[in-house]
Image (cartoon, rainbow, N blue to C red):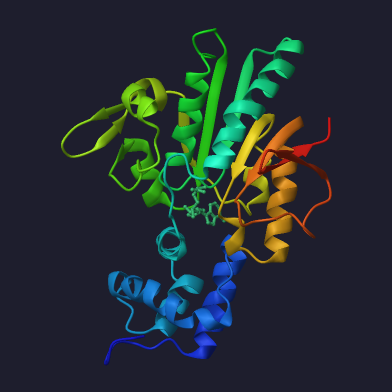
Amino acid sequence: MSLVGSPKLSNETFTQLRDLIYSKTGILFSVNKLYLLENRLKWRLEYSGCVNYEEYLYLLKYDPRRTQEYQSLFNSVTTNETFFFRDAIQTKAFYEDILPSVVMENEKAGRRELKLWSAASSTGEEAYTLAMQVLRRGLKAKGWKISVSASDINSKVLATARQGKYGPYSIKHVPPDYMEKYFNNSAEAYQVLPEVKNLVSFSNMNLIDGAAMRGMRDFDVIFCRNVLIYFDHEAKKKVIESLYDSLRPGGYLFIGYSESLHNISRAFKLKHFNKALVYQKEL
Ligand SMILES: C[S@@+](CC[C@H](N)C(=O)[O-])C[C@H]1O[C@@H](n2cnc3c(N)ncnc32)[C@H](O)[C@@H]1O
């Protein structure tokens, strides 16, 4: 709810802001999310010197500063919850089934290279988890070329990700042996070691930006988890089609535990690894 005296977001302006956010990001604020959006944009009004939401909308549409403001808008409207080793069933399937299978296939093809992508990385825990698991498999030591790309639309979370310093919430599910091997623990933070950091590169990328997505090619495994839930059907379809094109034939896609490709795409083969569901691009 808005505070007494603070600007109110009208239904009409909500609809226009919502449409604009959707067209830029794929994120859909449903009608019952008016107060959520009002709350998230309250600070943007203050920082940009707008007295109400109508002025803020005008700024986004016509002001010469609008390009910078878009980045701040994206930072304000995204939800960035994440932590290391999120979803034990999926991380186990990646380590025990997918990774060995991809390594075997690439080895057979004479390609000692592994390309992974955390495609809505938030503050980086997912990407670093993948890097740690690859190191744990000893692939780097065996001379494999490893790269973990990580991207997000929110520039603030990317800045945190690049630092690789975390608090207790983020590391709550890190197994003790990984904790010992891949973190430097000081009084103020848990710092990811350079050996892990060096495998990961972060970039600002919008999943619904088809042109940017076309630059992402030949991935063995893509993690795009817990972001499709914020999109509507059309945006999900668009993103999944792009991710399909970004995978090698035979490559794997992980989506969030509560997400599904039902009615979104029939191009993938759905595979079960114990309780984990993983989508595979046809060979
Ligand atoms: C809830 S986090 C998920 C983080 C991680 N994948 C996980 O599962 O723990 C969702 C992330 O998606 C990002 N996001 C939302 N819309 C996006 C878009 N259109 N393009 C790229 N990233 C987006 C948000 O900024 C946020 O950091």
State whether residue 88 is above or below residue 154.
above
Q: Residue at x 67, y 29 (%)?
A: 220
Residue 278: where, in percent of width, then height?
70, 41
Could one spot residue 118 in this view of the protein? no
- 187 sits left or right of 21 in the view: left
- 22 sits left or right of 247 in the view: left
Q: Residue at x 55, y 20 (%)?
A: 146
Q: Residue at x 74, y 57 (%)?
A: 237
186 vs 21, nearest the viewer: 186
Residue 91: where, in percent of width, then height?
55, 36
Residue 213: where, in percent of width, then height?
65, 43
How many discs appear?
A: 0
State whether residue 183 is above or below residue 232.
above
Specify the quadrant that holds the N terminus: bottom left
- 153 sits left or right of 39 in the view: right
State whether residue 117 is above or below residue 96.
below
